[in-house]
Image (cartoon, grey):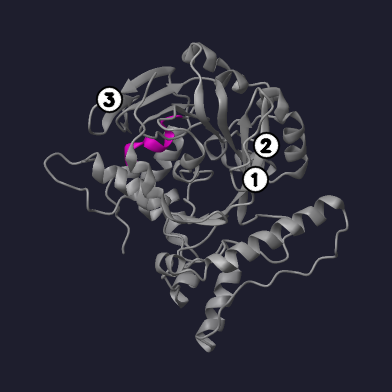
Amino acid sequence: MKLHLNSLLRMSVVYATQKSAILDHESWLMELTKKYKINNHEGEPTEHKRKNFQDLFDLRTPFLMDSQAEKIAKQLEESPALVMEPKRKKRKKDHMPQRKEKEIELTHIREMFTVLRQTPDFKLNYQFLPNIDDFRRNNSHIRNLRKSVSCCRFMEVTSSILPQLDEYHKGDEFGTKMINDNKYLVPPDVHYVCDDVNNILLHTLGFKFDVIVMDPPWQNKYVRRRTHAHGRHHGYGMMSVKDILQLPVGNLLEDGALLVVWCTNSISQIQEFLEGLNVWDVKLVATWFWLKVTKAGEPVTPLEGITHGKQPYERVFLAKKCSQGVVSQSIPDSLVFCSVPSGIHSHKPPLYELLKKYVGPHPQCLELFARSLTPGWMCYGMEVLRLQHSFLFEDSCQDE
């Protein structure tokens, strides 16, 4: 079960302090392809060519309706110097305690982001300036890629049920795994399991981990509606908070281990989850916030006036397993980190470099509900190979 944690993981962090950070998910993936020599065309080196997954990170403008984007484009034609943001309808003040807490949360994120965007690293990393045509296209290149014949096949095939797997891949380069005439690329030094997460103790055989990262399939009304309207490959199987808390996560954690949970934005689910977190013998020590931004460094939706709808950030809960009742407070609370999100729903940026200073040397790491593979980790989930499909690593056909 011992795996070597690869030093390449440090490539995900561009800048970090105790209060804020910048991650670059696209560059991290590109470094994987370079280091482990992905070559999809026999005899033709492709390591320096643009890959399909890079096009999915080419988010040039915020999330807008086409009519909003066209309106901004027309206004920029008249006054090119304007910095345009879509107007949001004013809403009545809500005095519910949960809303007050949310406003405190939003104020903190705005303040940290204001400081972060003044740093030289932020300005260097987000130099892109969208033009009139970028607003007019409204990120249609990303949407068109997802609708292309090849990508539609990728979405349909990789959301289908995979066979049960429990395999290791060693070596110095990516390997290939063929399933039903589909090719998946597997990085070195990884243990991957495709099975129901409820069965994980059968695959770990008493082994415990120093770091566990999990992104559970929280119940989500939007996903339910999309699945009903467009078919199963546009959604995923969801779990209630009760079902998530019944997973044997506590049995997998070493004493002092770090548990990292990507969380829903549903207030009721958050409250239920935090109230039941002690069932895993862990204590919450920090809440971090992932702020999603465009290539220009703008939040994907406005941080002002949020009351409902699509939010530009997600929460990450960090908890410690301490059976003696002593909880380390060294992990900073309310860290705000930003990155450009992938065009694939719920494709999360790698967090290990932000976490490594809070765990011991040579930690054993596990990702639950994984949909991709990380060198040096055990990755477990029903879709564990989904984002390893060779389509994502093939040369892009998009125009620059």
The answer to the question of whether label 3 and label 1 lie on touching residues, with beta carbons closer than 8 A, is: no
| Residue kind at label 2, given as amino acid type | Leu
User: What is the number of the mark on residue 284?
Assistant: 2
Residue bearing mark 1: 287
In whole angstroms, how far apart are the C-alphas of marks 2 and 3? 35 Å
Name the side, left or right, on which 129 lies relative to 394. Answer: right
The answer to the question of whether label 2 and label 1 lie on touching residues, with beta carbons closer than 8 A, is: yes
**Range of residues picked out in magenta:** 384-391
| Residue kind at label 1, given as amino acid type | Thr
Secondary structure under tag 1 reads strand
| Closer mark to the observer between disc 3 and disc 1 | 1
Q: In which quadrant is the C terminus drawn? A: bottom left
**Residue at (46%, 66%) from the top-left corner?**
122
Q: Nearer the viewer, residue 140 or 168?
A: 168
Looking at marks 3 and 1 on the same chain, the residue that comes earlier in the sequence is marked by: 3
* Residue 204 rendering spot, x and y as whole percentages: 48, 15
Residue bearing mark 3: 170
Q: Does the magenta stretch include residue 385?
A: yes
Secondary structure under tag 2 reads strand
| Residue kind at label 3, given as amino acid type | Lys
Magenta portion: prevailing SS class: helix
Residue that lies at the very extreme toward the right in this rendered image: 95
Q: In this view, does 32 lie above or below 81?
A: above
Looking at marks 2 and 3 on the same chain, the residue that comes earlier in the sequence is marked by: 3
